[in-house]
Amino acid sequence: MSDNYSADVVVVGTGVVGCTVAEHALDAGLSVLMLEAGPRVERWQIVENFRNLPPSLKANWDAAYPPKPWAPHLETYTDASAAEYLQLEGPDALAYRQGYVRYAGGATWHWAGICWRLTPEDMKLKSLYGVGRDWAFDYNTLEPYYTRAEYALGVSGPSDPALQWPPMRSKPYPMGQLPFGPGEQRFTDVAAKIGLHNLPAAQARNSGVSYNGRPACCGNNNCFPVCPIGAKYDAATTLPRIEAKGGVILANAVVYRVETGSKNAVQAVHFFDQDKVSHRVTGKVFVIACNGIETPKILLMSKNEKNSNGVANSSDQVGRNMMDQPKISAQITMAEPLWTGVGPVQSSSIMNTSQGDFRNVHTGALFRMENAARSRVGGLAALKKGLVGKALDAEIRRLSACTATLTIEHELIPLPYNRLTLSAKKDWLGLNKPNIYYDVSDYVRRSTATYTLPILKQLMAGLGTTDSQINNFYTHSDHIMGGCIMGTDPSTSVVDADCRAHDHDNLFLPGGGAMTTGGSGNSTLTMVALAMKASDAIVSQLKAG
Ligand SMILES: Cc1cc2nc3c(=O)[nH]c(=O)nc-3n(C[C@H](O)[C@H](O)[C@H](O)COP(=O)(O)OP(=O)(O)OC[C@H]3O[C@@H](n4cnc5c(N)ncnc54)[C@H](O)[C@@H]3O)c2cc1C
Ligand code: SF4
C-alpha cells in the first residue's frame, strides 16, 4: 500500500525518549512524525480503569493498562505461561518480567518518577574495576545533558550538595526537595545509626509549585498506576505540546520493519495499523525509541540481504547485554508504627552502598524503603484472618502502620549472553514475540550473599523488626537497558556516542538500550540525557544538509 507519510525526523515510540527527541527537532524547525504502537488515552480513563479494578489487582499497576491485541505487553500480574508476550528463559528468567505499557506516552504513565544520575565511577567500570565496559565518554560530557533532562522533566531535589547524588552538578535542581513522610524519616534515622546515608531522591514531580503546566504534588501516594492530577512527569503531558508545535502523532501504528537503501541508509519504516494494513513512512532521519526490548526486536525483525543479522547489527550485539537492576525485597513487621504512605510512593534511597573498590569482586546496590501506603495490603491480610468490626479496624490500622517493604537494587554489568532474540511464537499481528535469556551472574549473587543481605539485616534490626520474609529470588526493577549498547568500536557495539547506529548514518537508537552500564539507581534520567545528546546530533546532521 502506498502512503504519503513522511517527515524530516520520523520518531518511533512516544515514550519519554521519543518525546524528548521529537520536541527538540520541532524546536529546531524540523518536521516530525511520531509512530506509536498503542492507543492514545486520556488520564481520566486510566484513573477509571484503576478505580474499577478488584482490590486484589489494585497493587498491579499494569492492570490499569489492558493491552490492545495489536500492541501486546507483558501483564506482570498473570502467571508465567507460554501465552505470555515476553518469552523468558535462563536461570533468572522470572527476574526479567519487565513492566512497560504500549500506550501513547509509554511507561512513564506509571513510573515512580525517581531521577538518579550515574556517578563518574559508574561510567568507568572496566578501567576502575576490571569488569563490564567503559562508556564512550565521561561524566563531565554527560553532565550538561543531565541538567537539560532535569529541567525538561521538572525534577525536584535537594539544594545541599551533601544530600545530592552525585553532587557534581552545574545547576541546582529546577525545584526544591519534597518533604519526607514519617516512614522515610524514621528509615533515614535508622540508616544513619549504622553509618548509612538515606538521601532524598531527585524526582520528576513538582514540589510546592506548578511546573510546565503540571500542578504541585499533593502527596496522595497514587503514583502507581497513575498520578491522577499529573503532578508527576509523564510523557503523555508532552504529547499535546508536540502537536501544538506541529508534530504529527499516529497512534495504533506498530512498526515492524526498517527498510535500508543505498549506502545502507534507512529509507523507510513500515507499520501495521490496527486493521493489519501495512503502511510505509519515509524520512531523512529515523529514531527508534521503543524501549530496551522493543527497539532491538524491531531491528532483528528487519534483517535483509545487506543486513543479514538484522539492521544495525553487523557487530552481532543487537539484543545482547540486556540489563536491569536485579531486586531482592523483604516484607517486614515492626512493633512500632512506621506509617509509610505519606507522600510519593518512593522518595529516598541509600546510594553510597553502590560504590566502592569491592566492585572488582561483586556488585554494589541501592537500598530503599518503599513508601507505598500499606492500607490495601493490610486490609486484605486482616480480612483473610476472618476479623470483623472493631477487631478488623484495629488490625488494618496495625498492619498499615507497622509493616513495610525494604528493597535492594543491584547493579548488573553488561554480559553478552543476557540476550534478546526473536521467539518463533507470534503475536496477534503475526510478529515475533521477544525471547530473553537472563542470568543475573555470580557477580550479583556474590554481592547478595556477602554484602547486601548483611546490610539489609542490619536495617531490619535497626527498625525493630519482629517478623520478616526475605525473598530468596531476584525480581525485575523495570529499568530495561543494554540491547543496543553504545561504544566507540563498531565491531563490539551498536551505536556511537550520539546513539547513531554505527551501520546506518541516519538511524538513531537513543534510550535504555544504548546505555553501556546501568549503575544501581533508576535509569530513565540517563536515557533522557542520551536522547538530548542524540537530538543535538540529529539537528546538526540535518542542518548540515
Ligand atoms: C512500575 C514502574 C516504575 C518505574 N519507576 C521508575 C523510576 O522511578 N525511575 C526511573 O528512572 N524509571 C522508572 N521506570 C522505568 C521507566 O518507566 C522507563 O525507563 C521509561 O519509561 C522508558 O522510556 P522509553 O521512552 O525508553 O520507553 P517506553 O516508555 O516504554 O516507551 C516506548 C514507546 O514505544 C512504543 N512502541 C513499542 N513498540 C513499538 C512499535 N513496534 N511501533 C511503534 N511504537 C512502539 C510503546 O507503545 C511506547 O509508547 C519504571 C517502570 C515501571 C514499569
Ligand atoms: S503523590 Fe499523588 S500527586 Fe504526588 S505524584 Fe504521586 S500520585 Fe501524583
Image (cartoon, rainbow, N blue to C red):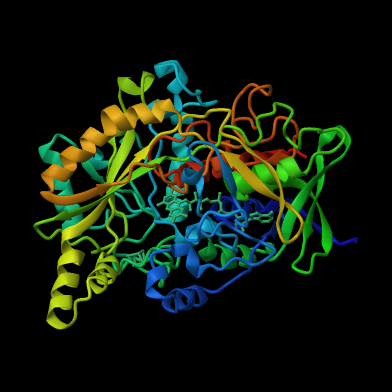
- Report the quarter where the C terminus lies: top right
Image quadrant assignment for residue 436: top right
Q: Nearer the viewer, residue 399 or 542?
A: 399
Asked whether, in this view, residue 130 is left or right of residue 168, the answer is right
* Residue 438 position in % (x across, y down): 53, 37
Q: How many marks?
A: 0
Asked whether, in this view, residue 147 is left or right of residue 239, the answer is left
Q: Residue at x 65, y 51 (%)?
A: 25
- As drawn, the residue found furthest toward the bottom would be 389
User: Visible in this render: residue 300?
Assistant: yes
Q: Nearer the viewer, residue 356 or 428?
A: 428
* Residue 457 position in % (x across, y down): 19, 39
- As drawn, the residue found furthest toward the right would be 2
Tell me if residue 355 comes above or below residue 182 in the rendering. Answer: above
- As drawn, the residue found furthest toward the front would be 386
Q: Residue at x 60, y 46 (%)?
A: 293
* Residue 146 position in % (x across, y down): 45, 41
The quadrant of the picture showing ligand 2 is: bottom left
Tell me if residue 250 comes above or below residue 525 in the rendering. Answer: below
Asked whether, in this view, residue 339 is left or right of residue 108, the answer is left
Image quadrant assignment for residue 486: top right
- Report the quarter where the N terminus lies: bottom right
Q: Nearer the viewer, residue 142 or 321?
A: 321
Q: Residue at x 83, y 60 (%)?
A: 278
Q: Residue at x 33, y 35 (%)?
A: 365
Asked whether, in this view, residue 508 is left or right of residue 116, the answer is right
* Residue 305 position in % (x across, y down): 87, 35
User: Visible in this render: residue 158?
Assistant: no
